[in-house]
Amino acid sequence: MSARDATRSILSLLDSLQKLSPRLEGRKDDFQFLQALVESNEFHSLIKVHHEVSAATTSSSEAKCTNALTVCHSLAYDLETSRHPETQQLFDLLTSPHMDALVSVHDRVANKEYPAVYSTAAQGSPPSLDEESVTRVRIDKQNDPLGATVKTGKNGRVLISRVLHGGAADKSGLLHAGDIIHEINGTGVRGFSVDQVAELMVDLRGTVVFKITPAISDLRPKRRTQAPTYMRTYFSYDPQQDNQTPCPEAGLKFDYGEILHIVNQDDPNWWQAVQYSNKNNTQAGIIPSKFMKEKLLCLEEMNQQTPPKKKGRNKKSMYSPSDTGGAGERMVTYERVVKIEPQLGKPRPIMLVAPRGGPFDMETLRARIVQSNPQRFGSPVKHTSRPPKPREEERGQYEFVSRQRMERDIRNNHYVEHGYFSGHYYGTSIRSIRSIIDSGRTCILVLIPSAIKLVRTGELKPFVAYCRAPTIEEMKENWVPSGHIKESHIHDVVRQARHLEDTYGRYFDHNIHFHDVESARDEVIALVDRLAQEQQWVPASWQENTAP
């Protein structure tokens, strides 16, 4: 009825009342009250309001948006990594409990998911907890995986065990670990196995409707901003070969030495991570945590224990490291790392490591690098307690100090390596390395390999370049005819190289495929050029220990 028709009806009603009033029985004041009510402005306003409401309810009442909560969480997901103050303020607003509740109610009304009214008297018993708290959530799933793993519980229930970072479920913010799944697109899943649920979900596209009982909200993991955590891996991992992983299909395969972005550490045994080098994939995968991997390595070592070998006579080296470290080198699985900018005027030292003997003449390589540009490169002067030979002080080959001072400095760990030969001490001091760094030159270090652990600190920040031996065939073809090595010594070189890589390989930042001193010199100089321009991954402890 239009407003004009309503007015006509009121006038017709008043006219009828006036005509009927002589014939009506009853009190006269009742008729006057009714007539005054119909003629009042309030009554006419009420009719107009009724007309507007009727017009609104008869028009289309379809909601414009039925998944506003998904939109809000997707927007918050995109804003999460920004550090702009206004963006952070918007993120806090979108993820606040009040906004979450408001938009959730909007979606329920838009989807006409009104709470059911149960008749206890009719049914004889109150409804179950599942019936009272069941809700439907809609998630847009295209080609990307859903990003959720499930497990089975009591009475055939199917529960969400984890939500993977970056997947459709995580971006929507509507599914959480602990939610009970009743239906997926109308198909009941109670009594299904994990594999059956996975098969049901794998081919789903578009809008997927889940009928769930949400987990207790206080136990749900909260979306929060946190500083990015990056790890360098010291083992290779293939989830398809791991019989411990909770879900091989959701696992992340990686190689030794990769950088991983750890996005979730809520589970103490299984982390979620993405490969830093793969910028196109934001979907996280499951990897063993540091605790889990080290526990498995301990079990493997216990199962493979062999009787200790008899100690034989080992060839003594003049030098020994000031700190040889301790046990547990084989247990290193991950190392937290950060990216640093090149420091202007303070280039990182380059430490050269190679097998002993043959063409691996690291002293000659160091001399050639320094000679190529003495203003840019330098090497530390070694200390000794022996008296100088004639004119030796002038050449500056050694820094001569007293025996008492050198013994005191060795006790105080002022040397990265030291040795005792023919009644005298020799060594390389931290102070001599520091002096070259402070002069703005690149310090070229040739130390015994076991000294790496003492040099590798946030104070010195060395870059370790390993001169890798060629293959056996290459050594036979190139080095044996030229007299660089005897064929009978090739296997000794291979054995030494394997020992270096197994023992210290995790410290190597760069591999040089060593052919000869000249090509190695050119590669080291090119490496120094690159380090002066590019960011580099370093242990996070270096930043923490040098922070003001």
Image (cartoon, rainbow, N blue to C red):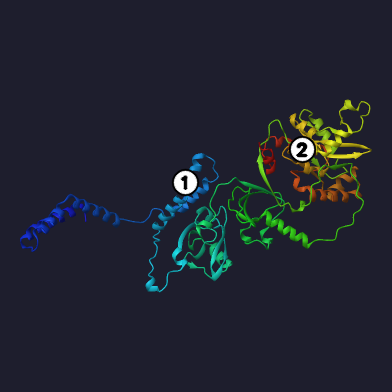
Residue 93's disc number: 1
The residue at the point 47 percent across, 66 percent down is 130
Name the amino acid, label 1. Leu
Q: Give whichever of 31, 105 is nearer the camera.
A: 31
Direction from residue 301 to residue 125 in the image, left or right: left
Label 2 sits on what residue type? Ile
Residue holding disc 2 = 350
From the viewer's perspective, is 236 left or right of 472? left
- Identify whether 537 is placed above or below 13: above
Mark 1 and mark 2: span between their CA atoms?
49 Å
* Residue 416, above or below 242: above
Q: Residue at x 57, y 69 (%)?
A: 193
**Residue closest to the eye, 437 or 260:** 437
Residue 142 shows up from this direction? no
Which quarter of the rendering shows the C terminus?
Answer: top right
Say if mark 1 contacts mark 2, CB within 8 Å.
no
Q: Residues within 10 Å of mark 2 (few under 14, many from 20)?
A: many
Q: What is the secondary structure assignment of the residue under circle 1?
A: helix
Q: Position of residue 134 (x, y in %)?
A: 46, 64
Find numbered disc 2 in the image and state the secondary structure of the residue it sits on. Answer: strand
Quadrant location of the N terminus in the rendered image: bottom left
Of callouts 1 and 2, the N-terminal one: 1
* Relative depth, front residue between 18 and 241: 18
Q: How far across and how far down the image is residue 251, in percent? A: 63, 58
As drawn, is 14 to the left or to the right of 164?
left
Quick check: 331 above or below 365?
A: below
Picture quarter containing residue 241? Answer: bottom right
Question: Seen in the image, is 472 located left or right of residue 227?
Answer: right
